[in-house]
Amino acid sequence: MDSLPGTAAAKIAGNLLDERDLAALATTCGFWRDILAADDTPLWRELLQSRFGEAPAAAPASAGAQTAPAARFRQLASLRQPVARAERVVWLNGQYLEVIADPSSTFRQAVQLNSVCWLDVGVRFPGVLPGRYYAAWRCRLQRHFFLEELRLTARQQRPQQDGGGGGAEQAAHAAEGEPAEQPEYLQPSVGHISNQQLNEVAAQVGPGWFELLGPPFEVAQPCGVFTELQNFSGVWKYGLVLDSVRLRRMPPAHEAGAAGPEAVGQPAAVRWAPA
């Protein structure tokens, strides 16, 4: 086993897209432990491409110095994205919404809602593996705020013929110099957070961080997932700070004591983040 070429090891272990399976593989022998401990090997490049459809060179500079294939894979596999680098934040122009430095936020940056009537934030997660999930938006309210009902959605990308994680086919188009096709999405899971619930949050946690939980959804095969936080009422809203959004994996439906919303299709709920 110690003489197995790196490219052959990549083909063997490249079918293990789940980071938990990779961690288990690393405990089997010294060979796999050393291969998985390295930051830049054919295996990590294969995994990054096959699950997320991303070549190592495409890792964004904004991700910092930790952009080696292994680090980039772990970053994406954590299923947590900063709102400050979201794919879509409408009216993020420094006036209506702006990126602010915030040492208390997960990524040291957050998006502050100053005043806007059309609130539309969307974060995409590539390579989401089968399982039950819900999106948790980490937020805080400023002393003076006004928010109407918030709409939380999660839309699954229609699975591609390649069976990958929603990015492989787009990456193939990019490699050939062709424009990537816009992904198609399935019917969204939708939940709502009422103004009354937000007022209850403000009364209990004040300016502290809390989480808005989106509706549960179930992923049948690897795909991309697009999560959204929206309000299109036309009434001016202000006083919300958005830190990050994370897809939280839920236990299987048959297991007792499942965390988060109990069943797919239930309305969204509110809970507080730990202090």
Image (spheres, rainbow, N blue to C red):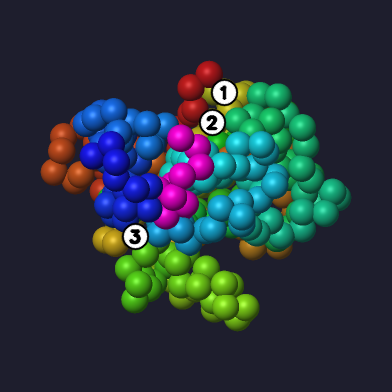
Instruction: Give the quarter of the image for residue 248.
Output: top left
**Residue that numbered label 3 is attached to:** 222
- Residue drawn 54% across the image and 31% down it: 210
Instruction: Give the quarter of the image for residue 260.
Output: top left
Element at badge 1?
Answer: helix
Main secondary-structure element of the magenta-colored stretch: helix
Asked whether, in this view, residue 171 is left or right of residue 19, the answer is right
**Residue that numbered label 1 is attached to:** 205
Local packing at callout 3 (Cα closer than 10 Å; few below 14, some 14-19, many 20+) is many
Q: Nearer the viewer, residue 148 or 140?
A: 140
- Residue drawn 78% across the image and 37% down it: 100
Q: Residue 193 appears at what percent x and percent y? A: 50, 47
Tell me whether circle 1 and circle 2 mark residues in contact (CB < 8 Å): yes
* Whether residue 225 is visible: no
Q: Is residue 101 above or below residue 168?
A: above
- The amino acid type found where label 1 is placed reads Val
Local packing at callout 2 (Cα closer than 10 Å; few below 14, some 14-19, many 20+) is many
Element at badge 2?
Answer: strand
